[in-house]
Image (cartoon, grey):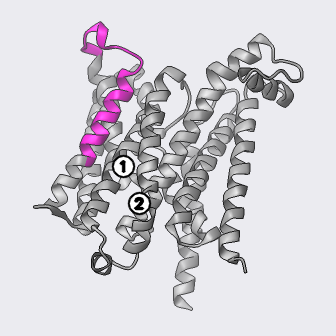
């Protein structure tokens, strides 16, 4: 007899994958230049040596491969990374409010990007490469997460409560740094800072995104390898230790993978809120709490949410576009408030 819950989870994963494919096609076709779906499919098929239908025009071809597909690829990678990182941190902290920004990596990356934009203007010309700002963001994001772990460590161990408090303190410190640098910036620099503080996928190029997508993939695979450990950890740290789980090793691996993946994501997209917080909750509502299901499904859900949010950001104020962080926060906050109210009503009854 088949397990109905297992079947349900397979259906959920298949539905998420199908919805994500449809969202990617829509995001690739819709924009200031609308590309008909047959032209879009023919252009992509031609890359694999398959000729089908009427090919896209040179303008459509250039818009698709130079602008749309890199943007969609970045949305896929960043959304999947934020989703799986949020699920992993919620499992590690056993706290449904945990997300990648909790360990300071988002604030640290924003501080690095803002610092380079404002202070890097006086750097030598050879240092002004398109990859310089993302590299600065990635480096400071990792350094901030490492600082949070160092603050919370005592000997060879770290405490969950101290990690949370250290993350809050580091976020406050980096926010103060960003505020000070914003005060020093020129009008032109302040306009550039908006991207990093509100988040966006615009301007993505293959040259910039492929190294970071590789790091996101490594981080995601690392977190997936810990999925069984998170199920054991749900019993409590003491019980998990009695069952033979090296809790401190799981904690270090989780923090390291989240810092690597979220740092790479924020380095290219800026701060995008609520994806890592909301995606795991939606997945648990659909298929239960097993992390063998939650982690891969959260990656799919996070990618779907970010690709759709970016599509909405481009359509809402066309021909201009909203920062995608505004869209994710505007949609995620009401959902999360409703979820909290639902849980509160359940606890009262």
Number of marks in the rendered image: 2
Q: CA distance from mark 2 to mark 1?
A: 11 Å
Q: Which residue is mark 2?
A: 226
Regarding residue 179, the answer to whether it shows in the image is no
Q: Nearer the viewer, residue 269 or 236?
A: 236
Give the SS element for disc 1.
helix
**Residue at figure coordinates x 29%, y 29% from the top left:** 115
Residue 152, position as x, y percentages in the image = 18, 60
Picture disc at residue 222:
none
Residue range corresponding to the magenta coloring: 121-145
- Label 2 neighbourhood size at 10 Å, few (<14), some (14-19), many (20+)? some
- Label 1 neighbourhood size at 10 Å, few (<14), some (14-19), many (20+)? many
Q: Which residue is mark 1?
A: 257
Residue 263, position as x, y percentages in the image = 37, 41
Most distant residue in the front direction: 1
* Residue 126 magenta-highlighted: yes
Regarding residue 193, the answer to whether it shows in the image is yes
Left or right: 147 as drawn, with respect to 113 = left
Above/below status of 207 relative to 258? above
Q: Main secondary structure of the magenta part?
A: helix
**Residue at figure coordinates x 66%, y 44% from the top left:** 308
Q: Nearer the viewer, residue 247 or 205?
A: 247
| Among the 4 quarters of the image, the one containing residue 123 | top left
Residue 39, position as x, y percentages in the image = 83, 24
**Residue at figure coordinates x 16%, y 55% from the top left:** 151
* Residue 63 magenta-highlighted: no
Callout 2–callout 1 Cβ contact below 8 Å: yes
Residue 100, position as x, y percentages in the image = 40, 52
Q: Quadrant of the N terminus?
A: bottom right
Left or right: 108 as drawn, with respect to 1 = left
């Amino acid at each position: 007899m088949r397990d109905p819950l297992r079947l349900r989870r397979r259906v959920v994963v298949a539905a998420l994958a199908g919805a994500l494919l449809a969202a990617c096609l829509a995001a690739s076709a819709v924009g200031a230049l609308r590309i008909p779906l047959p032209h879009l499919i023919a252009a992509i098929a031609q890359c694999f040596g398959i000729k089908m239908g009427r090919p896209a025009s040179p303008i459509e071809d250039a818009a698709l491969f130079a602008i749309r597909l890199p943007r969609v690829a970045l949305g896929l990678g960043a959304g999947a990374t934020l989703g799986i990182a949020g699920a992993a941190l919620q499992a590690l902290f056993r706290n449904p409010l945990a997300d990648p920004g909790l360990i300071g990596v988002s604030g640290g990356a924003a501080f690095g990007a803002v610092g380079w934009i404002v202070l890097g203007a006086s750097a030598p010309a050879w240092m002004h490469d398109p990859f310089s700002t993302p590299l600065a963001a990635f480096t400071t994001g990792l350094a901030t997460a490492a600082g949070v772990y160092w603050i919370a460590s005592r000997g060879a161990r770290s405490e969950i409560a101290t990690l949370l408090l250290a993350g809050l303190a580091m976020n406050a410190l980096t926010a103060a740094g960003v505020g000070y640098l914003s005060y020093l910036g020129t009008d032109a620099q302040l306009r550039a800072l908006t991207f990093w503080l509100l988040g966006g996928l615009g301007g993505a190029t293959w040259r910039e995104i492929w190294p970071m997508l590789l790091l996101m993939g490594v981080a995601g695979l690392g977190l997936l390898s810990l999925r069984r450990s998170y199920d054991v950890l749900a019993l409590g740290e003491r019980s998990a230790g009695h069952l033979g789980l090296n809790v401190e090793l799981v904690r270090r691996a989780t923090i390291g993978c989240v810092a690597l993946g979220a740092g790479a994501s924020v380095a290219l997209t800026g701060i995008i809120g609520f994806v890592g917080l909301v995606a795991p909750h939606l997945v648990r509502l659909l298929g239960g709490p097993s992390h063998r299901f939650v982690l891969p499904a959260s990656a799919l859900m996070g990618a779907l949410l970010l690709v759709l949010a970016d599509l909405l950001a481009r359509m809402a104020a066309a021909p201009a576009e909203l920062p995608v962080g505004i869209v994710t926060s505007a949609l995620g906050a009401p959902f999360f408030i409703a979820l909290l109210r639902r849980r509160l009503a359940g606890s009262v009854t």
